[in-house]
């Protein structure tokens, strides 16, 4: 498996073994793999893209509802504030980011984005009316997704709009169905450390 695919799966999984399993299953489905293969096969990056799209389509109604609330615009503004904040936050470390770091990340794409907008909409994204997607840790001064699944969903959601280079990638799927405990441990360790 190439580092690019491995890093992609690890990044999307966000440390969650269930998401890692789900993405790998979706890759198998996209590549029409229905049983354990004796030898590795080559799959194109389009299968990974399809797997990500399928993950979004299958996301729970609770997650979709939270994001629908966050993305809902009450009136037309110059900036799609919540979308900008969620996208930028998804690119930050899992343990969160400070107001200043997040503002810097947003300004990489929107150079004149006002700090006041970030302050106001970060506060809104912590409320039930906006899906309670974020939390603030006063001890560290960091904002982060309230649930790691939200960051995973945001990573996958925003990756759909990013163009990818079509490359053939060798992916090796090895799984022992008789040893589920070892397989689960392997997947969890892989998602956490990037060692698939």
Image: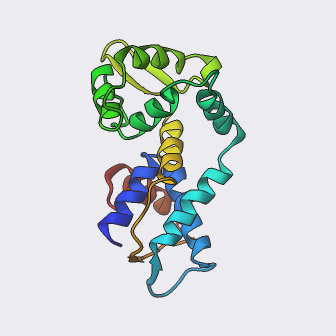
From the top left corner, tell me how far across and down residue 145 is, in percent: 47, 30
Image quarter of the N terminus: bottom left
For the image, the number of numbered tags is: 0
Q: At 43% from the left edge and 17% from the top edge, which residue is drawn? A: 117
Q: Position of residue 26 (x, y in %)?
A: 59, 65
Residue 53 position, x and y percent, is 59, 58
Decide if residue 35 is in sight here: yes
Q: Farthest residue toward the right?
A: 61
Residue most toward the bottom? 39
Residue 111 at x, y = what percent?
Answer: 31, 31
Q: In which quarter of the image is the C terminus?
A: bottom left
Comparing 94 with 118, the one in front is: 118
Residue 80 to residue 169: above or below: above
Image coloring type: rainbow
Residue at horizontal 45 percent and vertical 58 percent from the top: 187
In which quadrant of the rendered view does residue 101 lie?
top left
| Residue 122, above or below 20 | above
Q: In this picture, is 48 found above or below 74?
A: below
Left or right of 166? Residue 83 is right
Residue plotted at (48% across, 39% down): 151
Quadrant of res 162: bottom left
Residue at image location 36% in from the left, 12% down from the top: 138
Left or right of 94, for residue 184: right
Taking the image as drawn, is residue 146 in sight?
no
Along the line of sight, the residue nearer the viewer: 196 or 86: 86
């Amino acid at each position: 498996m190439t580092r690019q695919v491995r890093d992609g799966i690890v990044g999307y999984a966000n440390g969650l073994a269930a998401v890692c399993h789900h993405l790998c299953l979706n890759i198998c489905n996209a590549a029409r793999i229905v049983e354990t293969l004796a030898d590795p096969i080559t799959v194109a990056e389009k299968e990974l893209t399809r797997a990500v799209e399928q993950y979004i389509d299958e996301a729970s109604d609770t997650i979709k509802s939270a994001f629908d609330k966050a993305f809902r615009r009450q009136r037309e503004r110059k900036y799609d504030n919540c979308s900008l904040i969620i996208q930028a936050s998804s690119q930050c470390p899992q343990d969160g980011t400070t107001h200043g770091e997040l503002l810097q990340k947003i300004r990489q794409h929107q150079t004149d984005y006002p700090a006041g907008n970030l302050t106001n909409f970060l506060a809104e994204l912590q409320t039930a009316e906006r899906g309670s997607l974020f939390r603030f840790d006063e001890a560290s001064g960091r904002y982060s997704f309230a649930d790691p699944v939200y960051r995973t969903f945001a990573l996958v959601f925003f990756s759909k709009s990013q163009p990818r280079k079509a490359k053939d990638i060798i992916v090796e799927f090895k799984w022992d169905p008789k040893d589920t405990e070892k397989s689960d441990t392997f997947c969890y360790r892989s998602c956490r450390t990037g060692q698939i």
